[in-house]
Image: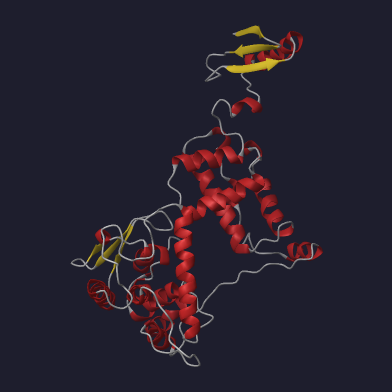
Amino acid sequence: MTTKRQRGAVWAYVVKRKGLLTRPLYLTFASEEEGDGYVKKLEALLDRGVLPDEFRAQQGEIVTVEDAAREYLAAQHVPESEKRCLAVVVTRIGATRVRAINYKWAESWVTAMKREQNLSPVTIRHHVGALARCFDWGTRHSIAALAVNPLRLLPKGYATYTASDAKAARVLDGEAREDVERDQRLRPGDETRIRATLAGQQPKGKQRSLALPSQAALECLFDLALETAMRMREMYTLSSDQLDIGKKTIFLDKTKNGDKRQVPLSSPALAAIKRYRRHVDRGERGMDGFKFEQERLFPWWNGELDHDALRATTSKLSRQFARIFDAAGCADLRFHDLRHEATSRLFERTKLSDVEVSRITGHKDPRVLRRYSNLRGSDLARKLW
């Protein structure tokens, strides 16, 4: 049913169709003649059960990639890193109609990221992975426009530059981007020098020791990083109620992957926490004015969960440890390398299975842990006859 009436200088139409439209369509035209002509054609399509694409979003349907991302983010708990990644994807291909997305489109999109944007393979995988998880949600919720997820059909190695991709990249004055897997570990003597620097020892070649605000907290963070393989943000956002000394565990509910997990504490980790608490209680080692609160275990974070506050804290701590590592003669070391070091030690020093290690570290993709498999080569050799 359609009704119309003149409102000032325009003609307003209200189109209703039970069973096809979840809400009325409101249309305005400069003249009655123009409105009658358009509505006549629209009604003919509705009679055949066809709803033009321009009205689907208005009816709450997912039409574009931007629509899909918006609904996905509203319905799912998604890590901040994935929100940022999806925001970039939407900026670039948000207007793409979901009904036009098939395997051929997926291949073309990956090719464009290589040949037109010259993105690194890891960035391409991040973009594809974020959108693929969005489409997975769409298929699970039986959204017609997302009946299948062609991104899951991409072959292994899809993000690696082929010879043709490399040639196209050079035409654009670029170079074929390669996967650079960071594999930095502590070298002999690094840990000793870092601990000495943290303790206030004057670095070699320097006139004075580093000024380290919250010195005891920095030492504890370094110890926990090496003993637990936790990420920096997982540690500095810890609250006292996440720590269970009796059960020797830390409960994480704010992980990068959005999952919760329990991290067991080794004897050195427990000793580090107890030592840190003593320094705090006594106001020693740069901890003047800070007291343990239920909201905070460490002094750097103000408790705000918005992205800017977290990023500012991460940046501040990263710069602080960069100074410490540089003073200790480890200028090429980053704080996140300590997570790699800790994971490597779990493989080298324990008999834990890959699954057990992943439960500690929070690695969701088993392929990520394969890079550590060579650390147990000697164990495999002993099992051979």
Instruction: Say if residue 85 shows up in the picture.
Output: yes
- x and y percent of residue 256 in the render? 43, 58
What residue appears at the point 52 percent right and 16 percent down from the top-left corner? 19
What residue appears at the point 74 percent right and 14 percent down from the top-left corner? 30
Drawn side of residue 182 relative to residue 75, left or right: right
- x and y percent of residue 363 in the render? 42, 63
- x and y percent of residue 266 in the render? 27, 74
Q: Nearer the viewer, residue 289 or 163?
A: 289
* Image quarter of the N terminus: top right
Drawn side of residue 171 relative to residue 104, left or right: right
- x and y percent of residue 247 in the render? 20, 66
Instruction: Say if residue 369 shows up in the picture.
Output: no
Depicted 76 relative to depicted 116: above or below: above
What residue appears at the point 26 percent right and 64 percent down from the top-left corner? 292
Depicted 120 relative to depicted 65: above or below: below
Depicted 243 relative to depicted 92: above or below: below
Q: Nearer the viewer, residue 362 or 383?
A: 362
What residue appears at the point 59 percent right and 29 percent down from the top-left corner? 57
* Image quarter of the C terminus: bottom left
State the residue lying farthest toward the bottom: 205
State the residue lying farthest toward the left: 246
State the residue lying farthest toward the front: 289
Depicted 134 relative to depicted 277: above or below: above
Label tally: 0
Drawn side of residue 185 relative to residue 92, left or right: left
Q: Nearer the viewer, residue 97 or 4?
A: 4
Q: Nearer the viewer, residue 145 or 198?
A: 198
State the residue lying farthest toward the right: 171
